[in-house]
């Protein structure tokens, strides 16, 4: 795959500098995970997946979903379900060909969605990447789920 084949875009230098400055502010102020998620990770995802000033993203978009957690059925027995703070999803809202199949799939899934979580806002949108923001050792890390 070439970069043109991948979803999203390479952020502008101005956007990258802005994300870096917000990360620096959060680090220096020792902000909690929620602030990192909104001030840094949100801006980075927006720079990659959304056009400036757009009301919605492209075919792949992202959202905050702090109340989402992976369903126990989809986790290894030794793992515990952590919260998913943000996620990237495939926006199926304009693709009517998928609608009926996704509804049918969600009716038979333990989460009643097409995803590994029961987060209702994305019931029929396909979650591609779940991101958990964790602050370990004084340093925030984004953890994929």
Image (cartoon, rainbow, N blue to C red):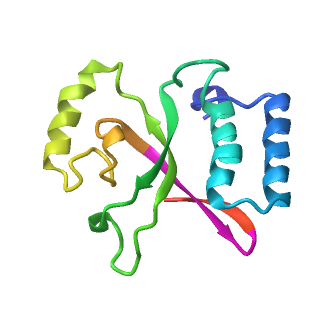
Give the residue drawn at x 70%, y 62%.
140
Q: Is residue 2 visible?
A: no
Q: Which image quarter holds the N terminus?
A: top right
Q: Find residue 39 and report its horizontal and vertical position in percent.
A: 70, 44
State the residue lying farthest toward the bottom: 78
Which residues lie in the magenta part?
128-138
- Place residue 6 in its image quadrant: top right
| 79 lies left or right of 87 | left
* Front residue of 80 and 36: 36
- Main SS of the magenta part reads strand
Q: Is residue 31 above or below residue 44?
A: below
* Front residue of 23 and 90: 23
Q: How many marks?
A: 0
Q: Is residue 40 visible?
A: yes
Q: Find residue 125 and report its horizontal and vertical position in percent.
A: 35, 36
Q: Find residue 55 and report its horizontal and vertical position in percent.
A: 54, 19
């Amino acid at each position: 795959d070439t970069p043109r084949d991948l979803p999203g875009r390479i952020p502008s230098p101005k956007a990258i500098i802005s994300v870096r400055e917000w990360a620096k502010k959060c680090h220096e102020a020792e902000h909690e995970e929620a602030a990192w998620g909104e001030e840094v990770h949100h801006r980075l995802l927006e720079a990659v997946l959304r056009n400036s000033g757009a009301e919605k993203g492209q075919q792949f978009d992202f959202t905050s979903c702090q109340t989402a957690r992976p369903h126990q059925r989809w986790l290894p027995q030794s793992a515990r379900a952590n919260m998913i703070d943000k996620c990237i999803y495939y926006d199926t809202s304009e693709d009517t060909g998928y609608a009926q199949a996704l509804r049918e799939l969600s009716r038979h899934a333990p989460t009643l969605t097409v995803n590994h979580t029961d987060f209702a806002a994305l019931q029929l949108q396909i979650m591609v990447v779940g991101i958990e923001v964790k602050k370990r050792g004084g340093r925030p890390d984004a953890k994929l789920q």
